[in-house]
Structures are given as structure tokens and as C-alpha cells.
């Protein structure tokens, strides 16, 4: 089984699950997102966002393939490129951190280490680029696949709460801890992404 992780680019953006491809939950503020969804321009807005971040900052996502088939992805960017981040009660994201926006793993690939590969690839990429930390807005009431990350799993993979909230705490992971991840943490990483995927539906990819 051949597995590889690549940067998300305009050329492979179409390999994201259909609804993820047109989802602009993070990329636009609430009002702009509503307008884009109403006019059917979400995919164009997503493409425009990826293009802008790639040109101005660099890689903003990782995409995993298994035997040439898209298996999952992560998306991340500095907070100034993520308008939705400002809408959270625990904002702003720290100036020295990159925001871990969302992640998704197709259920048929769960348990194969793809989730671990994706998150570690993101962390190692950011470490090489001089980023000190990754932060994320967690959801304490997370129950089903969504654009946000569940708090319990963020805690399990090494994030620590730095701004408490009853629903949307902000959590942080210092990138130097990546070098000390143990096997049990790697398993938690796999669970983080795998648990965010519903049962597969025949003939369709299930989005975040």
C-alpha cells in the first residue's frame, strides 16, 4: 500500500471531499460566508483563499493519498488569513502561532496511520518554517463530523487549554513537543481524525 503526503495546491484542491471543497467556514467571516453560500460562489472563494495564502505565506494544508486515492487532509494558516477566527469568544490566536483549522480522514482509511502522518507532516512543516506553536479552537459539544475539532482529542494529542470557555476554548501545542510524541499520542492522533468521519455512504465521499 503506497502512502504519500503532499501539500494542498490549486491543482489537487478538487481531491478534497465535495462539501469540504466548497466549505468556507474558516476562510470567510460569518456574513461573507452567508453571501457566498447564497450566490453559489463558495468553491471560487475557497480556491481564491488557497491561492492567496499559497502566494503570500506558503503551504496551508496537507493531503494524504493511499495508492493514488485521496484519504484525508488537514488545513492550517496564520490567524490573519482566517477571518472566522475573529468570531470566536476566545480569540485572538497568539501572534506566534498558526491556526489548526480543520482535519478529515475518510473512514475506509482509519486505523492505517494516515491521521498520524497528516498531523505530524503539518507540525514538521511548520517547525521547519520557524513557527513556534499550533493553536486551535476546540468544540466541547462536538458530536458529529464538522469543521471544528473536538476538545477531548486536542487535549489527547498534546494541546493545552490557554483560554477556557464553556463551548469554544482555545488550545495550544508548542511545536518542540513534536519531537517527544510517544506511540500512545500517535494513536490519539489517529483517533482524532478517524473519529471525525461518519460511516461511508456507497458512491459518495463524506465531507467534514
Image (cartoon, rainbow, N blue to C red):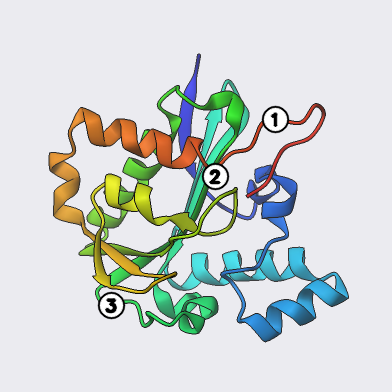
Q: Residue at x 14, y 53 (%)?
A: 176
Q: Nearer the viewer, residue 114 or 67?
A: 114
Q: Nearer the viewer, residue 173 or 71?
A: 173
Q: Is residue 21 left or right of residue 146?
A: right
Q: Is residue 177 left or right of residue 50?
A: left
Circle 1 SS class: loop
Q: Position of residue 179 (x, y in %)?
A: 15, 42
The earlier-in-sequence mark between 2 and 3 is: 3
**Pointer 2: residues within 10 angstroms few (<14), some, or many (20+)?**
many
Q: Residue at x 33, y 36 (%)?
A: 188
Q: Nearer the viewer, mark 2 or mark 1?
A: 1
**Pointer 3: residues within 10 angstroms few (<14), some, or many (20+)?**
some
Please name the residue that numbered disc 3 is placed on: 94
The image quadrant of residue 147 is: bottom right
Q: Is residue 14 left or right of residue 64?
A: right
Q: Position of residue 101 (x, y in %)?
A: 47, 62
Amino acid at each position: 500500500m503506497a502512502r504519500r503526503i503532499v501539500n494542498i495546491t490549486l491543482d489537487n484542491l478538487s481531491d478534497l471531499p465535495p462539501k469540504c471543497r466548497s466549505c468556507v467556514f474558516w476562510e470567510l467571516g460569518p456574513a461573507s460566508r452567508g453571501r457566498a453560500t447564497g450566490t453559489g460562489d463558495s468553491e471560487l472563494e475557497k480556491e481564491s483563499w488557497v491561492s492567496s495564502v499559497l502566494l503570500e505565506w506558503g503551504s496551508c494544508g496537507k493531503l494524504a493519498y493511499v495508492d493514488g486515492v485521496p484519504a484525508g487532509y488537514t488545513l492550517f494558516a496564520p490567524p490573519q488569513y482566517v477571518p472566522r477566527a475573529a468570531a470566536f469568544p476566545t480569540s485572538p490566536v497568539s501572534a506566534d502561532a498558526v491556526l489548526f483549522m480543520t482535519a478529515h480522514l475518510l473512514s475506509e482509511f482509519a486505523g492505517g496511520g494516515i491521521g498520524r502522518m497528516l498531523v505530524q507532516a503539518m507540525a514538521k512543516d511548520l517547525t521547519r518554517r520557524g513557527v513556534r506553536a499550533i493553536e486551535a479552537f476546540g468544540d466541547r459539544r462536538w458530536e458529529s463530523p464538522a469543521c471544528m475539532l473536538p476538545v477531548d482529542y486536542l487535549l489527547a494529542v498534546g494541546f493545552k487549554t490557554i483560554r477556557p470557555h464553556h463551548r469554544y476554548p482555545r488550545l495550544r501545542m508548542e511545536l518542540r513537543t513534536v519531537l517527544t510524541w510517544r506511540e500512545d499520542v500517535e494513536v490519539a492522533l489517529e483517533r482524532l481524525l478517524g473519529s471525525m468521519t461518519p460511516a461511508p455512504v456507497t458512491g459518495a465521499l463524506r465531507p467534514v
